[in-house]
Image (cartoon, grey):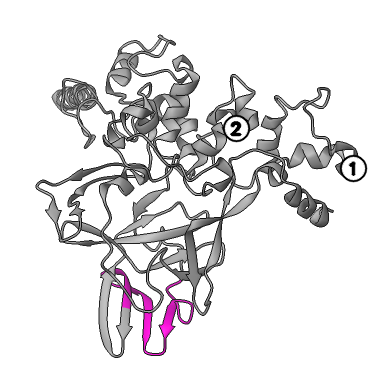
Amino acid sequence: MKTYKLAFFMVAGISLLVIFFSQCVHSPTGESTDMRGDEYAGPAACVSCHKSIYDSFLNTAHELTSRAASPQTVKGSFTPPDNRFEFRPGMQVMMEQRDSGLFEVATTDGRQEAHRFDIVVGSGRKAQTFLYWEGDEARQLPISYFVTAKAWANSPDFPADHIWFGRTIPSRCFECHTSTIQKKEPLRTDAFHQIDQFDRSHVLYGIDCERCHGPAAAHMQYQQEHPGEKQAYGITRYASLSRQQKLDMCAVCHSGTREMQRSAFNFRPGDTLSYFYYPQSDIGGTAAKMDVHGNQYQLLIASQCFLQSKILECVSCHNVHVEEKDRKAAFSSRCMNCHKPENPRFCKMAPSLGMAAIVNNCIDCHMPLKASRVITLQTNGQSVPLPNLVRNHLIAVYPEETKKFLAVRP
C-alpha cells in the first residue's frame, strides 16, 4: 500500500510540475522557449486549438520557404550523372552526399573547393537555392536547382564563365524567408559594403503563424486559463484590420526588393508599411513594366479589379493556410464572387469558350504566367537561361494569352 501511495504522489507531483512549466513556457512574464522572446509562444503552440489549420499550413510555400538542408529537403539528385553541372571542360560542380552532409564540390583545372549545403531557400514549387555558413556569414552556393526543369542550374546572377562562392547574404533576404535570425554586432565592412554576420544557432526557418498573426504568448495563456472563451484575446484579429492594413501585412514581403528603414522582423499586424520602407521614388514606370517576381502588391493594386472594388485584397483569392498550387478552379471560383454569370462583368468570351472553361480557369487568360527578368536560371549545357515563370498579379485582359488558351484547350 505504501508503494502505491508513493507512486501516486510521485505521479501527482510530476503532473503539477508539467502544468506549472507549461504555463511558464508561454507566459509573457515567464521564460519563453521561442528564440524571439517572451511575447512569442513558439511555432507549435497553435496546435492545441488550431490543429487542422496548423497541419495544413505545414505544406504551404510560406512554411517551406526555408529549411535546414538535408537529403529530404534538397530536391536535386546526388546520383551520377544527374549530380553534375559543367561550365566548360575542366570546370564543373558536383553535388555529393557524404557522411558529413551534402556538398557542392567545385573543380577548376584540377583544383577543388567544397562547401556544405546548410540552408535551403525556396519551397521547391519552382526552384531552390542554397546557402552555406562561412564563419558567421551566410553565403550562396553557385549551383541552384530548377524544379520545373528537373535540373541543377547556375544560381541567379552568378557568373557563367567561372565558379564563385563569394556572394554574402544580408539579413534582408532572411526577413522574408525565415521567421527570425539574430544578427551579430559589430557588423563587418569590406571595401564596398556592410556584411551581416549571424548567430547560426538563432534561426527559425520558414514563415510561421506569428509572423502574420503577431506574438501569441499572451493569447495562448489567456485561452488556457479561459477555455470557454470564444472571443480571441491577446492577439490581433485579422477581421479587425482595415483593408490597407491587411494589404500591408502581405506587402512587407511581396512588394519587391525595396530598401528598408526598419527590419521586417519587427512588423506586426496593423502596422503601416510606409514606416518600414523608404519612399519609392522610381517603380520602373507603369505596372505593366514591373517584373512579375516580388512585385505582387504593386501589380495587384494597379489592376482594375482592385481599383473598382472596395473589398478585394490578398486573402480574397489566397487561402494562406492551405497549399493551393495548380488549383486553378479554386482560384477561378473566387473570381466568380464578383464576376457572376448573370452580371455585366462576366467574361465576354463565355459564348465561344463555354461556361465550364471559364468557371474552371480564369487564371491563364487574366493572370498569365510571365517570365521574370530578375530571376533566370541557366541549366547544364544550356547557353541561354531558362525563364522563371511567375503568375502575373496585374489582373487584366491579355489578348495574346487568350489566343494561346483557345489554341490548347480541349
Left/right placement of residue 141 relative to residue 50 reads left
The picture places residue 329, in percent across and down from the top left corner, at 70, 40
Q: CA distance from mark 1 to mark 2?
A: 26 Å
Which residue corresponds to the image point at 39% horizontal and 37% vertical from the top-left? Answer: 280
- Residue 94 in magenta? yes
The picture places residue 239, in percent across and down from the top left corner, at 48, 17
Query: Mark 1 or mark 2, which has the lower sequence index?
Result: 2
Q: Which residues are magenta?
A: 77-105
Left/right placement of residue 17 relative to residue 233 reads left
Answer above or below: position of 157 versus 323. below
The picture places residue 117, in percent across and down from the top left corner, at 31, 64
Left/right placement of residue 108 relative to residue 14 reads right
Which image quarter: residue 241? top left
Q: Amino acid at mark 2?
A: Cys
Which residue corresponds to the image point at 30% horizontal and 39% vertical from the top-left? Answer: 260
Q: Nearer the viewer, residue 261 or 404?
A: 261
- Residue 331 in magenta? no
Which label number is shown at residue 317?
2
Which residue corresponds to the image point at 60% horizontal and 32% vertical from the top-left? Answer: 317
Which image quarter: residue 233? top left
Q: Amino acid at mark 1?
A: Ser
Q: Which residue is mark 1?
A: 352
The picture places residue 14, in percent across and down from the top left corner, at 18, 27
Answer above or below: position of 129 versus 10. below
Eye-nearest disc, 1 or 2 = 1
From the image, give the main secondary structure of the stretch colored magenta. Answer: strand
